[in-house]
Amino acid sequence: MAEVKRALLFVNFHKADARLLGDEIKEELGHLGIEPAIYSFEDAAAFSPESGFDIAISLGGDGTVLYAARVVSPYDIPILPINIGTLGFIAAVHPEEWAAVFRKWLGGTACISRRLMLDVAVERRGKTPARAVCLNDAVISSSGIAKIVRLKVSADTGGAELEDGCGGLLRLGHYRSDGLIVATPTGSTAYSVAAGGPIVDPEIEAVIINPICPFTLSNRPIVVPAHETVIVEVEAEQRSGILLTVDGQTSELLEPEDRVLIRSAPYRTRLIASGRGAFYTALRTKLNWFGVPGEYPSDSRGISPGGGHA
């Protein structure tokens, strides 16, 4: 059984019932001898790794999980993502089952999903004015009325040998589009899928490069290995404002000739009870793959397509 002394709660107080559920969790943790600390989005900057937290509990929707991931993942703190939002592709634990899932984690039997994160760095005239990490995506788009952005996109293989025995820089092309999404498999069900990108299994180590409404119809989404660095260069001819947005929550204005380097972060987000089964359940229910939300067709033996009893 895991030895747990302190738990960090990220609570989105804008969500209905978040405060009540937070108080319930705080009381239950106290009964288990675990010291809880509650943070909202506004004061989570006060979090310090020296505080020695053993687990983070996210109360909100997927956005709350994204925020928690950027704060705690560098310290290898697992996240229990409780969904009191709407879609909940990442936040897979329902409020009424949090205690059972938490006890399974304490006993070492809970599923743990390790999710790829991206390190995003802006290079400008030899300096790095901005850097961030993300669990979902980095989006480069227009910051003004003029929509079209002009970007050069490459992938640096880092010296890994290709089929022809050569490595180095792969030039993917010049993009004229409303923007560009660089997403993780976790982020494949977010902005990227709305822009026509593929849904990617969250356990796959890969990066999606997806142009938003490209001017040239032949510019299509492409998936590259996660060990490669995606390099996005803002062309010198770019005249309108351009914005880099990370996980839809932080942003940085870019300038002509800036380079954005996007690579795999040296750590992963550890999500409790959010494995492949939970992911595909979310796809079936949220995207209504079987026609009626929450209902699955079964054969005459009462077995659902997912393998469980209907």
Image (cartoon, rainbow, N blue to C red):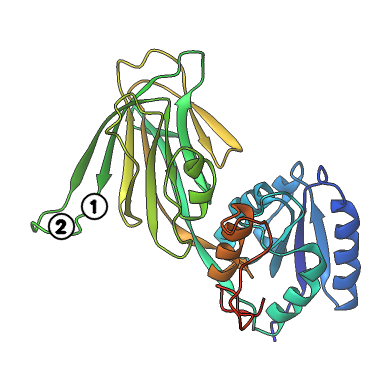
Residue 52 visible in rendering? no
Quadrant (top left, top right, bottom left, bottom right) of the N terminus: bottom right
Look at 34% across and 27% down and name the residue there: 125
The residue tagged 2 is: 162
**Label 2: element kind:** loop
Q: What kind of residue is marked 1?
A: Thr
SS for callout 1: loop
Q: Check whether the beta carbons of the residues at disc 1 and disc 2 lie within 8 A of each other.
A: yes
Q: Residue furthest left?
A: 164
Task: Estimate the spatial distance between the alpha carbons at disc 1 and disc 2, rounded to whole Å.
Answer: 9 Å
Where residue 145 appears, as percent x and y from the top left, is: 51, 13
Q: Amino acid at mark 2?
A: Leu
Q: Which residue is mark 1?
A: 157
* Residue 101 location (% of width, % of height): 73, 74
The percent coordinates of residue 106 (x first, y second) are 71, 80
Horizontal side, residue 133 vs residue 38: left or right: left
Q: Which residue is depicted at the point 55% across and 58% down?
A: 74
State whether residue 149 is above or below residue 55. Answer: above
